[in-house]
Image (cartoon, helix red, strand yellow):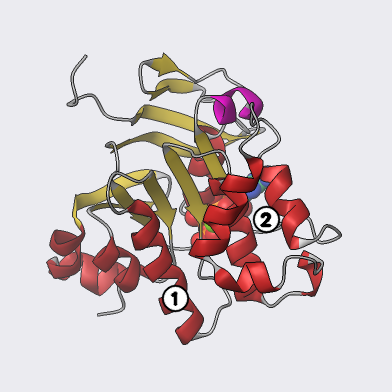
Amino acid sequence: MGDSMPLLKVDSVSAGYGDSEILRGVSIEVGKSEIVSIIGPNGAGKSTLMKTIFGLLHPRQGSIHFGDTDISRHTPYQIVGLGMCYVPQVANVFTDLTVEENLEMGAFLLKGGNMEERKERIYELFPRLKERRRQRAGKMSGGERQMVAMGSALMLDPTLVMMDEPSAGLSPKMVEMIFERIAHINRDGGPAILIVEQNAQLSLQMAHRGYVLASGENRFEGTGQDLLNDPEVGRLYLGG
Ligand SMILES: Nc1ncnc2c1ncn2[C@@H]1O[C@H](COP(=O)(O)OP(=O)(O)OP(=O)(O)O)[C@@H](O)[C@H]1O
Ligand SMILES: [Mg+2]
């Protein structure tokens, strides 16, 4: 298998909760070291898609491959072991643990002794976390918490990081900083990033490619620039 194989391939996936079907034949791909943005209205199924990819829900139809492994029936624990991390939309830090303990929790599957080195790398990425490393995560600002959540996800050196609305509730300045850090993490062969965002403009500017999801179905896809320039996407989903 060459480099043309996607890192993540979601193929015609249907999934939902109980009797309700939320995703109806969704297909997306993420290439190695690619930033892919998913946008769409509230209730479109964006978070459900991430939960399904991460094994918190299982597809009723279709399949999900991570590299050449079919992960459709895998547990989150198995999926983390394959190199995928997930920063959920809510409750993404352990509020009673300190910043440093959160990072260590992120590395609970880490084998070998390079915990200190990993933490140092995260502190370089987010110097603020180093200053605050003994503070409980529950006492930090929204933006700082988001840094803790991202830092914990990066502790295992994943090849794919999924982030569900990392900019939610943050000030414009903090949003800019978080997006800049995401682009930085991805640079120079860093992990691929699959990001769901309400902040569609900014996330499409940063993304290599994007998808618009509506009512649990694929609506549009293209490069970030294509989607930003598409009049229909603009009118319906970018408030333009
Ligand atoms: N645990 C659950 N049980 C039952 N229905 C759920 C559950 N979680 C989500 N849903 C329903 O699934 C649909 C899609 O929700 P989802 O959270 O995936 O949307 P979203 O695109 O992430 O929306 P938002 O932009 O508001 O975060 C909604 O109608 C929601 O009510
Ligand atoms: Mg959501």
Quick check: can you spot residue 235? Answer: yes
The magenta segment is: 76-81
> Cα distance, mark 1 to mark 2?
19 Å
Instruction: Please name whichever residue, 85 or 214, is drawn nearer the observer in this view of the structure.
Output: 85
SS for dot 1: helix
Q: Which mark is residue 177?
A: 1
Q: Position of residue 133 (x, y in %)?
A: 73, 65
Amino acid carrying label 2: it is: Asn
Q: Mainly helix, strand or loop, the magenta region?
A: helix
SS for dot 2: loop
Amino acid carrying label 1: it is: Met
Residue drawn at (49%, 31%), measured in percent from left and top?
83
Q: From the viewer's perspective, is the residue at label 1 or at label 2 nearer? A: 1
Check disc 2 and report the residue beneath it. Answer: 92
* Badge 1 density bin: few <14, some 14–19, many ≥20, Cα 10 Å: few
Q: Specify whether 101 is left or right of 178.
A: right
State which quarter of the image contains the N terminus. Answer: top left
Quadrant position of ligand 2: bottom right
* Disc 1 to disc 2: CB gap under 8 Å: no
* Numbered label tally: 2
Q: Specify whether 201 is left or right of 112.
A: left
Q: Is residue 166 above or below residue 110?
A: below
